[in-house]
Each structure stands twice: as structure tokens, then as C-alpha cells.
Image: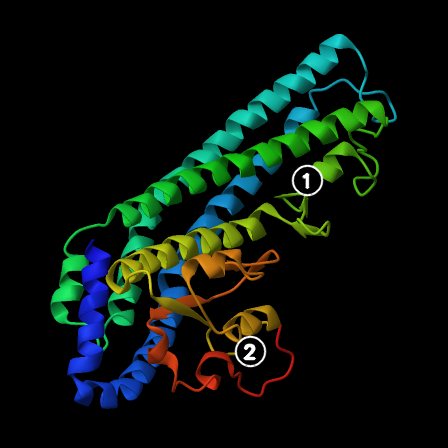
Amino acid sequence: MRRTSTRRSLISKRHDHKQIELKMPLSIEKMVAQMHALRARIEGGVVAQASVELAAIFAKAEIALARRQELFNSLLTYPDGKLQNIPENIDAANLIIKELHEDIGKFIVGPGKEWADDIIPTMHKAGRDLARLNLDVAFLSPEQIKSAFDLVLPAEKGVLKTGYQDTYRIMGVVGDDVESWFRRTMMDSVIEEIPLVNKLNPSADTLMSRLIESGRIKPIKIKTNSGKFITRSVRQRAEAIARIESGKIINRTHEALAADVLGDDAVYRNSNPHDSRTTPICRHASQAGLKTLAQWSASRFGRPPRLNPFHLCRSVLIGGMAEWFEDIPEKQFVDLPKQTNAP
């Protein structure tokens, strides 16, 4: 019911205030430009800070887990460094895995959840700031905007709840991945007879050298939906988690508020920062024109921050009515400065 009355108000304004219509294109252009600037500040501010904080947690975890290497010296090995395949020794190896599991909870999962508790409300506020700016246009009355921002919408509450759940789940998955890698590699040393240690030649291929690389956990291979394998260290994954999860909360909060005010007739245009870091798929999404939120979700790009396939973009969906964007040049959404070696 509320959205229907909102649409009637919008239609009334379009027909009753011709002087506003004449000013509208400049107003919308200014709004789009300011959306670019605000999204860039958010990316370089709260999102970057979140990435740094989570990366610090992961770096500390890597060092702590690497220090577990002394536990391997307690295991029984043959003179050539291979693990002695006897029940007591296997039990001791499993105990090491158990202690590693406890360390992963202590250094990755627990601190990661605390990080989420601190950062998610900040991202929610950033999303509301984006929505406030997106809706600060001539067609919408201050009363309409105020009514949307006076309370936290059920959709926003859903975004926050999902944000916490997703981030908690991801932190657990990261911990499980690390533990699984340790466990699999430990058992490989028994099955493949890989030496546990080689004290005479530390650079030789041993279980310890596989587990420990310069005080860091060995990078983990991830298989994408397309079948492609990519390698990510735990620390690299920290940055991706921070940027993706932050972006989801920021963008979904913004979209929920925009949809509440604009109604079902609203359309959205994908928009990216204009710099050399903007990759082709992100630029192509901004060339895809106007779509509803449902159409963006069903499109080959999906909705930002992660655009298909497996690609992180610093994008935002700018909402409005279709006629708002008629006179906005496409270059305002997709042009790039002429720079070489863009990633």
C-alpha cells in the first residue's frame, strides 16, 4: 500500500511541476556524480579499514599456526624423516590436528566474528548514506525521504541479519578450509610417504615445508563455478571477504531504502568508479542499461559487489524512475580515463 501511494505521488509531481522537470536532468547528473564520489570515499575509508583489520587477524593467525611446527618434532619418524606408521604416532598426529582446530577457532573464527560485530553496523550506515544521497532529487519530497529513514525497514533488518549470518559462516568456512588442508596434508605424508622433516636439508619437500612457508600457511586452491582454479592465501582471502561482505551490506541497505521510496516501477543503473582499476566486466555491467532489481539479479552480471563470474566490482546500483536517466550521457557511467596497464 505504501509503495502504491509513493508511485501516485511521483506521478503527481511529474505532471504538476513542470519547472521541476526542466531542472531534473542537471539535478540527476549531480546526484550521480555525488554517488560516485561517496561510493569512492566509502571504498577508500570504511571498507579499506575493514580489509586492513581482517587482514591483520589473518596474518596473526598465520604466524600462530606456523609456530605449531614444533609439534611435528614430537612425532616419531624414521631416519629419512618419514612418519612412523604406528597407532600411537597416528594418534599423536590426530592430537596435533585437534590442537590446530582449537587454534583456528582462537585466532581466525572467534576474532573474525568480533570483527563482523564491529564492522557490519558501520556498513549499514554507509548504505543508508548512499540511499539518502540517491533519493535527494527534485522528484521526491522531503516527507517521502523522512518517512523511509525514520525507522529501520524490515528489508534492512533482513540485510543486517543475513550480513551477520553470512560473515559468521564464511569465517567458519575459512577455519574449516585451513584445518582440512592441514589434515589432508598430514595424512598424505603417511599414504605417500612424504618425509615429515628433513633436518639436513630444510628446503627439501617435506610435510613441514608444505605446511609452513616463511611463517605463512600454504596458499589454498579454490575451484570456481566455471571450473577454473585460483590460488588464494588466507591473507588474500581476508581482503576479498572484507570487501565482498561489506559491499553486500552497503548495497543491499541502499537498495532496500530506494525500493521502499521509489516503488515497484523503479529501475537501477549500474555505476562504477572511473579509474584504471575498473575492469572490463565491471564496465560492461554499466553498459547494460536500466533494469529492475529482479532483472539485475537474473542477468549475466548479477548484482554488485560481486558480478558474475566470480568477479568483485566496486559498483553501486543507482535507483530512480526510467525518465530520470534519459538525458544522462552513458559516459558518466562507463567512461574510463586513458591509462595503460589497467588491471
Q: Nearer the viewer, mark 2 or mark 1?
A: 2
Q: Secondary structure at mark 1?
A: strand
| Mark drawn on residue 140 | none
Q: Is residue 240 above or below residue 87?
A: below
Closest to the observer: 5 or 244? Answer: 5
Asked where in the image residue 81 lies, by quadrant, the reply is top right
According to the image, label 2 marks what residue? 276
Q: Secondary structure at mark 2?
A: loop
Closest to the observer: 15 or 182? Answer: 15
Q: Position of residue 80 (x, y in %)?
A: 88, 26
- Residue type pointed to by label 2: Ser
In-image side of 37 versus 96 (left or right): left
According to the image, label 1 marks what residue? 212
At 47% from the left and 83% from the top, the residue drawn is 330
At 70% from the left and 25% from the top, the residue drawn is 73
In-image side of 201 versus 3 (left or right): right
**How far apart are labels 2 and 1 at the CA level?**
36 Å
Precedes in sequence: disc 2 or disc 1 = 1
- Residue type pointed to by label 1: Ile
Residue 145 in sight in this render: yes
